[in-house]
Image: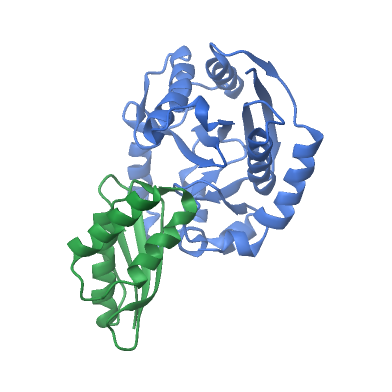
Chain colours: A blue, B green
Amino acid sequence: MKWRVIMFEHHDAFTNMALDEACSEAVADGKVPPTIRFYGWQPSAVSIGYHQSITDEVDLEECRKSEIDVVRRRTGGGAVYHDYNGEITYSVIAPEIYFTKDIIASYKIICGWIVNGLKTLNLEAEFKPINDIIVGGKKVSGNAQTRRHGVLLQHGTLLFDLDVRKMFSVLKVSKEKISDKMIASVEERVTSLKRLGIADKNEAYKALVEAFTQGKEFEFGSWSENELLRAKELATTKYRTTEWNFQR
Amino acid sequence: MKSKITAKVEGGKMLRMELELSESQDKAKYVKITGDFFIHPEDSLVVIEKTLVMSNASEGMDVIAVKIDEICKSQGIQLIGITPQAIASAFSEAIKQAKENKTGALE
């Protein structure tokens, strides 16, 4: 089946997660084709993994002061600070049967698309199980997957720019630990496209679109009316709620 | 008699466990597991928590690990970045610390 590709768009955190779920439902019902979407976060946001405790992981007061949204994902994994300008996020939403049953192997396939995109930017990247992509031994992309109702959803981020100080101010690391030493240690483990010499975010985005669609029949498309309506509903009744975000 | 422990699982994922012991201290009456690991299907984490709540506090780590492994196999639960042994180890430590009535970290 032909894939639908939804070009980069910014949304708030709740709408981003709601769109992923609304699209997953529509794919499960056969109402829309398998979908690849690219997006950003406006305002900047923190997303936490499905199994994480929001109060353990996020400095909610700092987020409130900085007007940073906080949302729980449907996928496992860790807390991520999504800077408005700092990353390109993607989601792949397709029937599970499009991929192998082996979850790590399917991470490798989709992460392989990112690795290929980075290759066209002359960056030697590699997939590092479980869910990371590294360049020169440093993490540049984190990814997370869920499979529900026969649909695979994998979303992930490609770091374009990294503000470690900001990241530490919203993620709960004890204030004492936000020392220069700790920041240096994170910078030894994490990198960004900018640090790797890719100054043009659009160039990186184009490389990703090219790599994600390579060998696939696809067309650029938009959300259906039903997906938009459902996403609006889910954003309000689920992703913005205390019940969802504070469930653990 | 509560405890909250943090353990780093081999491979780098974090596992936190909050536990409350029963009055008689022979069982946990409440267990909550959180962390940055993956479980498929996601909602089966509660099945593992229930398994722990139904276990005796005196049971050894290996016994608990086998129980978790069996429940995962029988219900098609996949643990990624976390293992039955890691959960069992955290449970034992959380029991121990609850009895001592303190919180702490497992490295």
Q: Quadrant of the N terminus of chain A?
A: top right
Q: Eyeballing the image, is A130 above or below A167? A: above
Left or right of residue A239, residue B1 in this image: left
- Most foreground residue, A120 or A173: A120
Work out whether residue B106 can be spotted.
no
- Which residue sits at x=75%, y=31%? A223
- Which residue sits at x=33%, y=37%? A188
Q: Residue furthest front?
A: B74
Horizontal and vertical percent position of residue A78? 45, 48
Snapshot quadrant of residue B52: bottom left
Snapshot quadrant of residue A244: bottom right
Q: Residue furthest bottom?
A: B23
Horizontal and vertical percent position of residue B35? 40, 56
Q: Eyeballing the image, is A187 above or below B88? A: above
Q: Eyeballing the image, is A15 above or below A219? A: below
- Most foreground residue, A28 or A201: A28
Q: Eyeballing the image, is B50 above or below B11? A: below
Horizontal and vertical percent position of residue A219? 69, 16
Horizontal and vertical percent position of residue B41? 46, 48
Work out whether residue A207 can be spotted.
yes
